[in-house]
Image: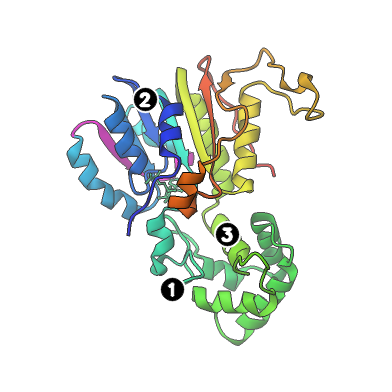
Amino acid sequence: MSHVPVMLEEVLQNLAPRDGGAYLDGTFGGGGYARAILQHAACTLWAIDRDPEALARGAALVALNPGRLHLLEGSFGDMLGLLGCAGVTALDGVVLDLGLSSFQIDDASRGFSFRGDGPLDMRMSRSGPSAADLVAQLSEAELADTLFQFGEERLSRRIARAIIRARAEAPITTTGQLAAIIRGVVPPSRDGIDPSTRSFQALRIRVNDELAEIARGLSAAATLLNPGGRLVVVSFHSLEDRIVKRFFADAAGRAPSPSRHDPRGLAMTPAARFKLLTSRALRPRESEIAANPRARSARLRAMECLTRGQTQEFEARQ
Ligand SMILES: C[S@@+](CC[C@H](N)C(=O)[O-])C[C@H]1O[C@@H](n2cnc3c(N)ncnc32)[C@H](O)[C@@H]1O
């Protein structure tokens, strides 16, 4: 098992780590970005992950980079506190690679995937309520809302009804059980996407409070950056990217454009604390997608800090 870092070259180009700089990788995962950043410049790197297994695997990389790589367990939404406890109050760059690592997806015992059968868990941090708890406890309306809001699942009501019917007969405790219930009420799609894909995404986002985490992480990162510091975010679906895109537009002082063709919408206001480095999201090259199909849906956005300042808590509005 391994994790192939996505859009690594583009991440390095946009983060542009410098000798002597201090950087944060808010999503350490398999350590692919971290290793490359440490090789690219004689810098210090702080790395956060909420998954204790990711950090345990990272010990070897820490040993190879004495005094340069520091691992912190927790959520990147709490980066101000986590770094503050370590005496770090300013950074020259932050990278976030959202979502799951291949280690998490491919390990059936983590319960993220409908492919192998495993416990219906989905907790990145291994703490708090699991997906099985949500499926057991949410009302039919709450389940339907979750599937619709976080999975953009059009058949959310039908699936919620089927879950309620099934759980009245026996507790739903495995990914296989849930996938079978969904397959029973959602017809196979013509593009070959598994009928469970959207529902599993929705539960995962809710279990890990992922969208609120992104909003908190972006605000905190923008507060920590020095002038010239870069924020680079790789997202994997439209719900994530929408939050990143709106946050970047706000930080760069760009009012939402009234029309795609109206140049006034792109005018910078005096409030701009950041300058966009990517006017639209970068996508992986065809060759990368061919070599690593998991890169398929990646989008990278980057911006550079102009002046240091406090960034208001940003709300994860849809
Ligand atoms: C896509 S992987 C990162 C892979 C990494 N860039 C690499 O090259 O190996 C995402 C990682 O971020 C972690 N993660 C996701 N959301 C998080 C959050 N809010 N706080 C901390 N870690 C998070 C996951 O546990 C996972 O290990």
State the residue position of label 2: 17
Mark 3 to mark 1 CA distance (whole Å): 16 Å
Evaluate if marks 1 and 2 touch, with contact meaning CB atoms under 8 Å apart: no
Magenta-colored span: 66-77
* Residue 285, horizontal then vertical, whole percent: 50, 41
* Residue 16, horizontal then vertical, whole percent: 40, 24
Q: In the rendered image of this protein, does residue 274 appear above or below residue 233? A: above
- Residue 201: which numbered mark, if any? 3
Residue 27 in view of the camera? yes
State the residue position of label 1: 118
Mark 2 to mark 3 CA distance (whole Å): 33 Å
Mark nearer the N terminus (2 vs 3): 2
Of all residues shown, which one is farthest toward the top? 270
Mark 1 to mark 2 CA distance (whole Å): 40 Å
Q: Is residue 45 magenta?
A: no
* Residue 25, horizontal then vertical, whole percent: 39, 37
**Mark 2 is on which residue type?**
Pro
Quarter of the image where one finds residue 7 = top left
Q: Depth check: 27 or 310 in front? A: 27
- Taking the image as shown, residue 143 lies to the left or right of residue 57, namely right
Identify the residue at horizontal 58%, vertical 18% (top origin). Answer: 273
**Mark 1 is on which residue type?**
Gly
Q: In the rendered image of this protein, does residue 288 appear above or below residue 163? A: above
Give SS at disc 1: loop
Q: Quadrant of the N terminus?
A: bottom left
Q: In the rendered image of this protein, does residue 136 appear above or below residue 279? A: below
* Residue 182, horizontal then vertical, whole percent: 63, 74
Within 10 Å of disc 2 (Cα), the crowding (few <14, some 14-19, many 20+) is many
Q: Nearer the viewer, mark 2 or mark 3?
A: 2
Mark nearer the N terminus (1 vs 2): 2
Q: Depth check: 13 or 287 in front? A: 287
Mark nearer the N terminus (3 vs 1): 1
